[in-house]
Image (spheres, rainbow, N blue to C red):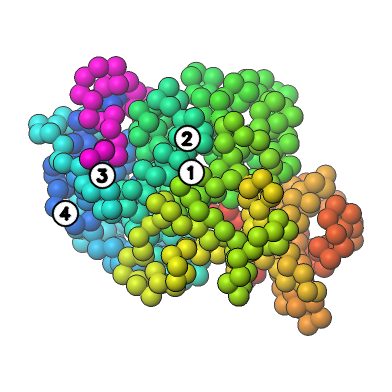
Amino acid sequence: MISLLPALHETSGPTASREAVRFGEHVLTYAQLAGASTSLAGRIAGAGRVAVWATSTPETVVAVVAALLAGVPAVPLNPKTGERELAHIVADSAPSVVLAGAADVLPPSLGGLERLDVDTAAAATDPPPPEPSPGSPALIVYTSGTTGPPKGAILPRRAIAASLDALEDAWRWTADDVLVHALPLFHVHGLILGVLGPLRRGGSVRHLGRFTTEGVARELASGGTMLFGVPTMYHRLAGALGDPAGSGSLTKALAGARLLVSGSAALPVHDHERIAAATGRRVIERYGMTETLMNTGVRADGEPRPGTVGPPLSGVDLRLVEEDGTVLDDTVSIGEIQVRGPNLFTGYLNRPEATAGAFTEDGWFRTGDMATIDADGYVRIVGRKATDLIKSGGYKIGAGEIENALLDHPGVREAAVTGEPDDDLGERIVAWVVPADPESPPGERELADHVADLLAPHKRPRAVRYLDVLPRNELGKIMKRSLGA
């Protein structure tokens, strides 16, 4: 049976001595990671489920890898989660053990669990257990809970392997790649793509701990070949590139990277262009979800096209569907993305009704994301069905293209677009704007005309509301339900 992390089984030779993970000054080679993880795997074998206090540290990597080696489903916990939500996750997933760093202070909601401290210097005394079956659960990752209590998505080993291998194909990802990122390790982006991705290839990951433009420049300039980030990070990089005082080293570092990848939310076209103009390099985007892992991605040898997330990845079937279930076959209409393939989760923990409702009768997963598809297969996501599809005056309008149009205005620093009930139009378009100059914001009529000139008159905002900052979660996604409230 093929191993999920084959490089960890090479006990000697160049791979064993190669750097696997680095967090600041703390480095683990493949041999050291294998030893510590195998030792811990022996202690948790047969545990049922284990919770992982997922700080951005080597201890989290060792804990997750140990669970994978032991064949025990791991539940990554966000250390910043509030007590009520954390208590729900613990009660729902019912782990028997929590894995944490020795110095971690755990909240009261974890007090009833046995605690095992992770020792990154431990050495294995026994060989790793046999490789579990591909269909067995590897991780239970909880969704953000925007429409109710968070749900635990059960991710099998075959889904992780399928997604990472599809990205290997799309991005020409090899053992020679050194990935740089500062993403949290309780989520698909930072943990599965950002840690398990390099480890499956036999490559290296350098985690910054905390995102800084200086850290990105330093690690890319000293051997990093790939950068993973969310739009907030790339927005800050774009801003730093415009600062004459310190942009030289950052410009050179970004220009020298093999691949710049953005995900978890749409990267505004404005930031795409600013980075490309300064470095000559294009950021590429991909699209995935907790339940599906990766669905699409711009290929390393493909055309980086701002506003798109590329074509479907190898092994992924993707279609757009109307509200009545009609499958769309044109390149104009907006429809809901539905996917199927080996990358999908097996269901929501303890939620059979939610699981059944997430799939069509013929096995397609309903993503809730709305998109169009270009003639060459590139997917353009316009937003979430619940918050980003606006039905106004008989038109279906995606919030994303209006947001990009607003960001093209020099007086706009950040923008979000929502729909609100309107007796005449059904819904009216509302723009939420953070002005570049708070003392002199662009006028409502000015912004409406700007959008109408770039797009179409029916897509202009009918109201503009000014904010100091847009509410975002830790991955940089705008929390539009907070705007509505």
- Location of mark 4 (residue): 47
- Location of mark 2 (residue): 169
Amino acid, disc 3? Leu
- Location of mark 3 (residue): 68
Assess disc 1: are there few (<14), some (14-19) or many (≥20) residues with their C-alpha within 10 Å of its C-alpha. some
Spot the residue most to the bottom.
Answer: 423
Magenta segment boundaries in residue numbering: 1-28
Spot the residue most to the left.
Answer: 125
Q: Do the residues labelled 4 and 2 touch (CB within 8 Å)?
A: no
Q: Do the residues labelled 2 and 1 touch (CB within 8 Å)?
A: yes
Numbered tag placed on residue 191 in the rendering: none
Q: Which of marks 1 and 3 is nearer the N terminus?
A: 3
Q: Earlier in the sequence, mark 4 or mark 2?
A: 4
Numbered tag placed on residue 314 in the rendering: 1
Quarter location, residue 245: top right
Q: In which quarter of the image is the C terminus?
A: bottom right
Assess disc 3: are there few (<14), some (14-19) or many (≥20) residues with their C-alpha within 10 Å of its C-alpha. many
> Residue 47, how many percent across, how many down?
16, 54
